[in-house]
Image (cartoon, helix red, strand yellow):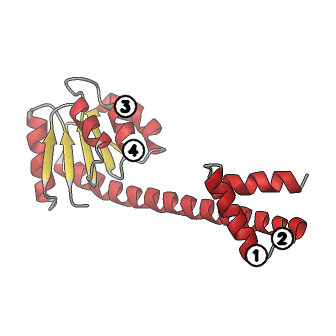
Amino acid sequence: MERVIIVTPPSKTAKTIEKLLKNEGFSPVNVVNSGSEMRRMIKNGISADLVIINAPLPDEFGNDLAETAAEESAAAVIMICSGDIAVELESGFADLGIATLPKPISGEAFSRCLSDIEELHGNFRNVKESAEILCRIDDMRLINRAKSTLMKYLQFTEPQAHRYLEKYAMNNRCTRREAAIHIINIYEK
C-alpha cells in the first residue's frame, strides 16, 4: 500500500495517526477534514490504497463513509472510533473488509491493524477477481450455447452464428449475454 488518505477533524489523534503511518513507511499521507470532501474524492475516482476514518467527523459519524469507500473504491478501509462503537461496527464491517480500531490507539495495535487490513484487503481483491472470472466463464458458456442453437436450428456455420449474435446485440443495444439468452429462449422452448 502506498497512498493513504486520513479523514479526520483536526485533533491530536490525527497527528498521532499521521506519525504512526510515517513510521510504518507510508507516503504520501493526505489529510481530508470532512466526510463530504472524501465523498467528492470517491466520486471523482479516488486513487488511494488505504483510507483511514477517524470518527466522528464534523459532518457525519463516518460509518456510512467507510461503507461507501469500501464499496466504491479499491482502497482498504480502517475506521477508528471509541471502543464500544468499534465493537458494534466490527461485525457489520467484516463482510465489507473494513477494519475497526478502538480509541485510544497505540502504536502496536495500529501496526497490527495495518498488517491485518493488508492481508484482508488482498483476500477481498482475490475474491472479487475470482467472481469476475466465473462470471466471464458463465457468459462464454451461454454465448457458445446460443451459437450452437443457431447452428442447430438455422444451419449457420460457427462464424455465421458468431456474427449473428454480435449483430443482434449491437442492433438491440444489449450485451452479448442478453442476446444469447434471447436466442436460447426463442429456439429452445
| Disc 1 residue type (three-letter) | Glu
**Residue 147 x, y percent position in the rendering:** 77, 67
Residue that label 3 marks: 64
| Residue density around tag 2, few if under 14, some if 14–19, many if 20 or more, within 10 Å | some
**Residue 57 x, y percent position in the rendering:** 22, 28
Task: Single out the mark in the foreground, 4 or 2.
Answer: 2
| Disc 4 residue type (three-letter) | Glu
| Disc 2 residue type (three-letter) | Met
Task: Single out the mark in the foreground, 1 or 3.
Answer: 1
Task: Single out the mark in the foreground, 4 or 3.
Answer: 4
Earlier residue among tags 2 and 1 = 2
Residue that label 1 marks: 158
Residue that label 4 marks: 72
| Disc 3 residue type (three-letter) | Asp
Name the side, left or right, on which 48 lies relative to 93.
left
Question: At x 17% / y 50%, what residue is drawn?
Answer: 107
Q: CA distance from mark 1 to mark 3?
A: 50 Å
Question: At x 38% / y 38%, what residue is drawn?
Answer: 68
Residue at disc 3, secondary structure: helix
The residue lying furthest to the top in this view is: 59
Where does the N terminus fall, quadrant-wise? bottom left
Any part of residue 101 in sight: no
